[in-house]
């Protein structure tokens, strides 16, 4: 086997801190977990999605990935696989399946709940330095560690199958919850991206390559890298001060369905996190740790769908108690509206 091409990458540095048993809640972006609560409040959704993911979605994704992409390993693109292994070791996460696909777009993504995978676009691998690539890999590992894939799928189902969902919750006015729930989903999705940028930084434990990786995702012009000014890009986050509040409101409404925060905002947030006390405490070893889970007997596991321990028990809905069963949905919608209003008001105060 040939020597690793990226032996001098930051993730291999002798002073690199391995974050043994770190919980993703140690580095979540403010409001990430609260925004996710609106989705978790839908009775039985997490358990149902876990079952569908394990018995259908993951299997077809696994088949498609192996038929259409290149699966990397220690013996196939070993240098890239070693970077993934190292990032997983630092974040105390099981190594997922990893694939490369020929695509010029600078992108990477994760999927799966039990059999997780990371897909790297060839354009991304070719455009980024090993350290920048580790930031992106760490970002994707953060999604896996936080089990974001399950709730992304829930949000997608809310978008595509709302009419069916509303029909099985026979409560007058339930259709009015579609918009607030979608607002809650998109708000959480954006906050989850901030959380995973933090995971990428924790893999590198060096801010510069993380900022550089994000800057390249916003716009890479070959041959002009030496003229890029990240501080100038961060300064673009002040543009809202140059317009009136009506324009700000219209902008918020137009961008409410975006899934990723804009790059200047991500750059600013990452820089602020790197200079904060929470980040320093984690590197000093002061962080929340995951508690090892007891393994359930195989027979019991085969009798019921996999459940997210953070979710309430599966709720059943019948004619007698349909109103009670729908209360978490109604509460989630109200909470979503309140949080969206607060978020919008916060933008006006900046």
Image (cartoon, rainbow, N blue to C red):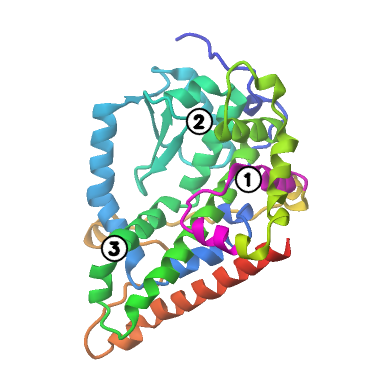
In magenta, the rendered stretch is 249-275
The first of marks 3 and 1 along the sequence is 3
Q: Could you tell me which secondary element the residue under label 2 belongs to?
A: helix
For marks 3 and 1, give the CA distance: 33 Å
**What is the chief secondary structure element of the magenta stretch?**
helix
Report how many numbered discs are placed on residues in the image.
3
Residue carrying label 2: 85
Look at discs 3 and 1 and give the one toward the viewer. Answer: 1
Q: Residues within 10 Å of mark 3 (few under 14, many from 20)?
A: some
Look at discs 2 and 3 and give the one toward the viewer. Answer: 3
For marks 2 and 1, give the CA distance: 25 Å
Q: Residue 297 lies in what quarter of the image?
A: bottom left
Q: Residue at x 62, y 71 (%)?
A: 342
Residue carrying label 3: 48
Is residue 176 found left or right of 262 in the rendered image? left
> Would you place residue 255 above or below residue 283 in this image?
below
Q: Position of residue 285 (x, y in %)?
A: 71, 47
- In-front residue for pair 40/76: 40
> Hey, which residue is sitting farthest bottom in the picture?
320
> Would you place residue 175 above or below residue 171 in this image?
above
Is residue 173 found left or right of 25 in the rendered image? left
Look at discs 2 and 1 and give the one toward the viewer. Answer: 1
The circle on residue 266 is: 1
Q: Position of residue 343 (x, y in %)?
A: 61, 66
In the rendered view of the protein, which quadrant contains the C terminus?
bottom right
Q: Could you tell me which secondary element the residue under label 1 belongs to?
A: helix
């Amino acid at each position: 086997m040939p020597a690793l091409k990226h032996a001098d990458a930051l993730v291999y540095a002798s002073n690199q801190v391995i974050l043994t048993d770190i919980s993703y809640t140690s580095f979540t972006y403010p409001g990430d977990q609260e925004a996710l609560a609106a989705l978790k409040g839908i009775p039985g959704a997490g358990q149902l999605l876990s079952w569908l993911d394990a018995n259908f979605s993951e299997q077809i994704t696994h088949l498609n990935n192996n038929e259409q992409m290149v699966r990397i390993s220690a013996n196939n693109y070993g240098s890239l696989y070693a970077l993934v292994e190292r990032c997983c070791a630092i974040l105390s996460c099981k190594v997922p399946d990893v694939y490369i696909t020929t695509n010029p777009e600078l992108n990477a993504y994760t999927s799966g709940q039990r059999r997780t995978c990371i897909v790297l676009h060839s354009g991304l691998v070719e455009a980024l330095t090993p350290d920048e690539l580790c930031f992106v890999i760490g970002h994707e590992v953060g999604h896996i560690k936080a089990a974001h894939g399950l709730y992304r799928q829930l949000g997608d189902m809310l978008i595509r199958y709302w009419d069916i969902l509303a029909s099985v919750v026979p409560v007058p006015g339930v259709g009015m919850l579609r918009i607030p729930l979608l607002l809650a989903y998109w708000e959480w999705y954006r906050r989850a991206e901030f959380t995973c940028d933090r995971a990428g930084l924790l893999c590198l434990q060096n801010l510069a390559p993380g900022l550089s990786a994000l800057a390249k995702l916003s716009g890479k012009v070959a041959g002009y890298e030496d003229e890029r000014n990240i501080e100038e890009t961060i300064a673009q986050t002040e543009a809202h001060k140059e317009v009136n509040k009506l324009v700000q409101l219209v902008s918020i409404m137009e961008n409410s369905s975006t899934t990723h925060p804009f790059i200047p905002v991500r750059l600013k947030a990452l820089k602020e996190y790197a200079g904060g006390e929470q980040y320093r405490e984690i590197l000093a070893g002061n962080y929340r740790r995951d508690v090892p889970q007891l393994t359930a007997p195989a027979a019991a596991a085969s009798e019921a769908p996999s459940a997210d321990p953070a979710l309430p028990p599966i709720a059943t809905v019948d004619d007698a108690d349909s109103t009670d069963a729908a209360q978490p949905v109604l509460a989630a919608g109200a909470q979503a509206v309140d949080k969206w209003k607060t978020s919008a008001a916060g933008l006006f105060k900046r």
